[in-house]
Image (tube, grey):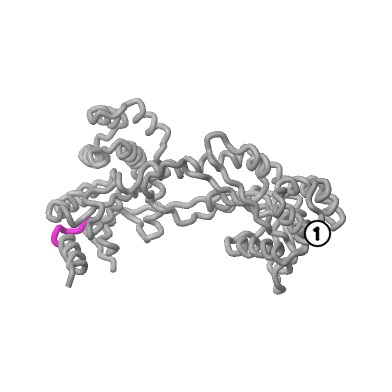
Amino acid sequence: MKTTGQQSESRSQLKNESGRTHSPKRAQSLYFSLFSVCFVVSALLVLILIPRVAVAAENTADPPEVTVEVFDDFQCPYCGQFSKTVRQLQSKGIEGIKTHVVFKNFPLSFHPDAQLAAQAAMAAREQGKFWEMHDLLYGNQAALKRDDLLRDAKKLGLDMDRFGKDLDSDRVKQIIQADFAEGMKRGVQGTPTFFVNGKAYSGVMPYEKVKQLVVEEYGKRRAIAEIPDSLLSEGPAGAPLTIEFFADLESPISQSAKRMLDQIIAQHPSEVRIQFRNFPLSFHPLAGMAHGAAMAAARDGHFWEFVTYILDHQETLREQDLIAYAGTLGMDQTKFAETIEQRRYEPRVDADLAEGFQRGVRGSPVIFVNGRRIDGVPSLQTLTDYVQSELAAKSPK
């Protein structure tokens, strides 16, 4: 059920990019004959999928990990070019970032030697030599016949009897089939396609470009991990009722909504928890700075003080004033200023925005009372009725 309050404001957004792939066309036959035609897109096409972005969980001691999953075909010439990037990332990694590279098989039916080459790679993996076989296969894509593969296995010093059995085993074929099915399910339409923490890209990219994607993803995960929900909430963690408050701190009507929520907290101090969600609107030029500053303050335990300060000074809000106010709260002003300038917590704000969009939020403020939605600023009576109704429903009969 959705209720509309007195006022609200709204926003919209869109993103897109591009890359180069070997791409199949769907046909009616099974599995490897699913594709019959390949085309090459010369312009850089990067398919960016926007997966569900979870709002920050609690802080963890371990730094976030970035996983790169690569769907490749051993006979694809573009995969051959991209293999150098993949191998560099896998062998050298990126300093300061825990990076995990996962290879997935996606042999295309119009590449006649791709399936057997994939089986050879999986058979070599059984003896701990996958990446070495990977290098040999991509190093000479014109030599992928059975005799060539056996020669490569011998060159790597593999147990040849075991390799021969694994090469044609049902288990190895099932691994490849599972990879292929996973790729189809995740929207892979050509090779190479790779995912960085679930976000899809396609086409050949140099190492520095992929490194940049990994660094950016790491920054996002780190920012989200550093500002958990608990730092943006008010009221007991175990409260029976949670009120989520999606708001733009530059919106003139956010303060009215916040005052209503303050009165609810005062009436139910042990029963209600307020959870703030960032929802800056694109047409408010200072909203990004305001929300970034609030996140930086949250890191040091001063979120709600900053929210109050920002809402009280919307018409005269300046960066130097935010920095000065941070100093009055005992925060390191230099560190605070750097955090704002670097937009360190922009990904944390974006995570809330994505969550809001996925739940149909298009304006600010929007309030959810245990999932029941109110758009705009409700009257105190309306909000009280919602809260009392939800609390009564949770009370023992």
Q: In the rendered image of this protein, does residue 275 appear above or below residue 180?
A: above
Left or right: residue 143 versus residue 219 is: right
Q: Amino acid at mark 1?
A: Gly
Residue 358 or residue 16, whichever sits in front: 358
Residue ranking furthest to the top = 334
Q: Position of residue 213 (x, y in %)?
A: 56, 42
Q: Residue at x 45, y 44 (%)?
A: 221
Q: Residue at x 25, y 34 (%)?
A: 316
Q: Main secondary structure of the magenta part?
A: loop
Q: Position of residue 149 (x, y in %)?
A: 82, 54
Is disc 1 placed on a helix, strand or loop? helix
Quadrant where the N terminus sits is bottom left
- Examine the rendering and report whether any part of residue 94 can be seen: yes
Q: Position of residue 60 (x, y in %)?
A: 40, 44
- Examine the rendering and report whether any part of residue 290 can be seen: no
Q: Residue at x 61, y 47 (%)?
A: 101
Is residue 379 on the magenta stretch?
yes
Left or right: residue 379 versus residue 292 is: left
Instruction: Point out the stretch of residues depicted in magenta.
Output: 377-381
Quadrant where the C terminus sits is bottom left
Name the residue tied to disc 1: 164
Residue ranking furthest to the right = 147
Residue 256 or residue 293, whichever sits in front: 293
Residue 25 or residue 344, whichever sits in front: 344
Is residue 193 on the magenta stretch?
no
Q: Position of residue 54 (x, y in %)?
A: 41, 53
